[in-house]
């Protein structure tokens, strides 16, 4: 059984996919499975997925009709076998010690979640984001406000699979910020969270097909929807009190 399940949604990324999957193969930690979810990609991405499955038995591929990134990630979660879960976007890549550092910290300290820093790549420039998390759990939610570009990521975290058993899934029909909703709930349910003060995940902002590079009115509406759901969730769990009009 793998220790870690890596879930990679795949759609129209034939230009970037080899770089992503090669970085996973190059990991210094080897006890992983990588679930590739080909979301009805119209280019050669699905073929590339099949090539990696044939090359390395740790890769698994799901081919499905296009249903969006949330549906793809949920499909990966449904078959994941690892003790811990992590996500990689198919146009990004990871450093060689990514899994070794995150999993090693999680096991050594018996924590539910470990967070690492991120390198943001844009126009040949790199901006690294590395922060230290607060020691107290009650301060963790404030990190979403203070460091939104760090905590709101889902891809810079490794999380115990049991946290997803609390009905944590990606909202279908949402084009952006679906990872914020899941990342927020995972942090809320986690009894313990630590940070590795290394930038181990490489986030490529140069992909013109990326959702974050193609803002539309629906994306704004989706952000507002997710924000409202977070406020509602906090209210239901007695974390905040909404005033009555």
Image (cartoon, rainbow, N blue to C red):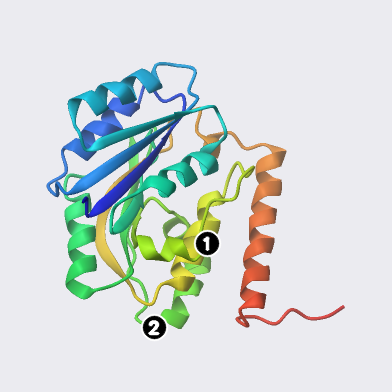
Locate residue 112 relative to residue 68 in the image: left or right.
left
Q: How many marks?
A: 2
Depicted 44 relative to depicted 211: above or below: above
Tell me residue 170's x, y (percent): 54, 51
Around disc 1, counting alpha carbons within 10 Å, would you say few (fewer than 14), some (14 to 19), or many (20 or more)?
few
Q: Residue at x 33, y 25 (%)?
A: 49
Disc 2 or 1, which lies upstream in sequence? 2
Around disc 2, counting alpha carbons within 10 Å, would you say few (fewer than 14), some (14 to 19), or many (20 or more)?
few
Tell me residue 60's x, y (percent): 30, 35
Along the viewing direction, whichever of 133 and 76 lies nearer the viewer? 76
- Whether residue 105 is visible to the viewer of this picture, yes or no, is yes
User: Which residue corresponds to mark 1?
Assistant: 167
Q: Residue at x 20, y 68 (%)?
A: 107
Label 1 SS: loop
Q: Where is residue 109, by image quadrant?
A: bottom left
Q: Residue at x 63, y 70 (%)?
A: 233
Q: CA distance from mark 2 to mark 1?
A: 25 Å
User: Which residue corresponds to mark 2?
Assistant: 136
Residue ranking furthest to the left: 28
Q: Where is residue 90, by image quadrant?
A: top left
Depicted 228 relative to depicted 153: above or below: below
Q: Residue at x 45, y 16 (%)?
A: 43
Label 2 SS: loop
Along the viewing direction, whichever of 145 and 183 lies nearer the viewer? 183
Return the mark for residue 57. none
Q: Choose mark 2 or mark 1, whichever is in front.
A: 1
Quadrant assignment for the C terminus: bottom right
Tell me residue 138's x, y (percent): 46, 82
Tell me residue 104's x, y (percent): 17, 63
């Amino acid at each position: 059984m793998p220790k870690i399940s890596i879930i990679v949604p795949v759609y129209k990324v034939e230009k970037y996919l080899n770089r992503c999957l090669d970085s996973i193969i190059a990991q210094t930690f080897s006890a992983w499975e990588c679930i590739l979810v080909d979301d009805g990609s119209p280019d050669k991405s699905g073929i590339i997925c099949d090539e990696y499955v044939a090359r390395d038995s740790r890769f698994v591929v799901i081919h499905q009709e296009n249903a969006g990134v949330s549906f793809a990630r949920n499909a990966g979660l449904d078959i994941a076998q690892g003790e811990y879960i992590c996500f990689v976007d198919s146009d990004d890549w990871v450093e060689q010690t990514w899994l070794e550092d995150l999993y090693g910290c999680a096991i050594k300290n018996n924590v539910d979640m470990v967070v690492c820093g991120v390198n943001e790549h844009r126009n040949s420039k790199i901006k690294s984001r590395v922060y230290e998390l607060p020691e107290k759990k009650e301060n963790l939610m404030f990190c979403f406000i203070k460091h939104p570009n760090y905590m709101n990521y889902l891809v810079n975290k490794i999380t115990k699979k049991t946290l997803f058993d609390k009905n944590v899934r990606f909202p279908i029909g949402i084009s952006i910020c679906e990872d914020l909703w899941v990342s927020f709930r995972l942090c809320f349910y986690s009894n313990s969270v630590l940070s590795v003060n290394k930038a181990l995940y490489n986030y490529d902002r140069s992909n013109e097909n990326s959702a974050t590079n193609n803002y539309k009115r629906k994306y704004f509406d989706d952000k507002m929807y997710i924000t409202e759901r977070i406020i509602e969730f906090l209210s239901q769990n007695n974390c905040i009190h909404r005033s009555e009009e």
